[in-house]
Amino acid sequence: MNDKPNFLFFMPETLRADAVFGPKKHRAQTPVMDKLAEEGVAFAQCFSQMSLCSPSHCSMFTDLYPHTLGHCSLR
């Protein structure tokens, strides 16, 4: 048996939370994402360092603010 934990970072690009986790009547049907959330860890309150996805992803993986390395746009 492998004692090392498995991590899956699922970061869909430009996805509104209410489209997936909002009221069932109005949200998209996402059975695979629902199963991932049920079997793993899902965070109900998260904060982003920037409103754009790419700089925010850079911040998450480098532990630095986006402007520190110049990642302030989509380019």
Image (cartoon, rainbow, N blue to C red):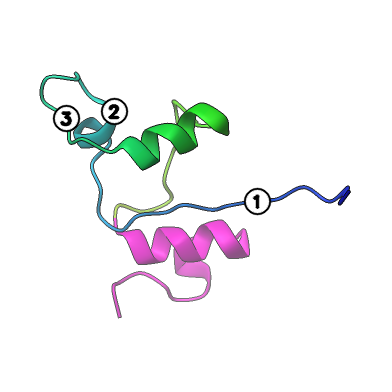
Q: Residue at x 49, y 66 (%)?
A: 58
Mark-to-mark CA distance, 1 and 3? 27 Å
Above or below: residue 44 compared with residue 66? above
Label whose residue precedes the other's in the sequence (2 or 1): 1
Q: Nearer the viewer, residue 2 or 65?
A: 2
Image location (x, y in percent) of residue 48? 41, 46
User: Which type of secondary structure does the marked residue at label 1 adopt?
Assistant: loop
Label whose residue precedes the other's in the sequence (2 or 3): 2
Label whose residue precedes the other's in the sequence (1 or 3): 1
Q: Which residue is mark 1?
A: 7
Above or below: residue 43 compared with residue 72? above
Q: Which residue is mark 3?
A: 27
Above or below: residue 15 compared with residue 24? below
Image location (x, y in percent) of residue 19? 19, 35
As for residue 63 lying within the magenta part, the answer is: yes
Q: Which residue is mark 2?
A: 21
Q: What type is the residue that disc 3 sits on? A: Arg
Q: Residue at x 46, y 52 (%)?
A: 10
Q: What type is the residue that disc 2 sits on? A: Phe
| Magenta highlight range | 52-75
Quadrant position of residue 44: top left
